[in-house]
Amino acid sequence: MKVEIIKCLKDNYSYLLINEKNKNACVIDPSESKPIIDFVEKENINLKFILNTHHHYDHVGGNNELKKKYGSKIVGLNMIKIEYQK
């Protein structure tokens, strides 16, 4: 297992947990999608899961685009409606 720290927004970080054998990964708290997409594409990662620790925008802002692009499953919340999530 490998952990990559991805800088997002001005003062946030998201974390990628990567299985080095099969390149499957989970992103934790993707506040924005672009830095995550850039890394995933560069490293040929399979983004399987999006884990949110809570509902604030600086933790879920990248959910929609990442889910749409990679078909990732969103996990970790009580799945109550998040106003930023469609």
Image: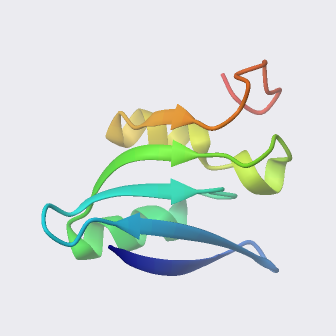
Query: Quick one: which residue is furthest to the front in this view?
Result: 1
Residue 25 lies left or right of residue 32; in this view the side is left
Residue 86 lies left or right of residue 81; in this view the side is left
- Residue ID at (82%, 40%): 55
- Up/down of 11 relative to 47, above or below: below
Residue 74 coordinates in the image, percent (x, y): 53, 34
Residue 25 lies left or right of residue 64; in this view the side is left
Q: Quadrant of the C terminus?
A: top right
- Up/down of 29 relative to 63, above or below: below
Model colouring:
rainbow
Count of number-bearing discs: 0
- Residue ID at (20%, 67%): 44
- Residue ID at (67%, 46%): 52
User: Which of the 4 image quadrants contains residue 64?
Assistant: top right
Residue 42 coordinates in the image, percent (x, y): 27, 75
**Viewer-proximal residue, 59 or 3?**
3
Residue 25 coordinates in the image, percent (x, y): 34, 57
Residue 79 coordinates in the image, percent (x, y): 70, 22
Residue 84 lies left or right of residue 16; in this view the side is right
Q: Quadrant of the N terminus?
A: bottom left
- Up/down of 16 relative to 29, above or below: below
- Residue ID at (21%, 72%): 20
User: Which of the 4 image quadrants contains residue 83?
Assistant: top right
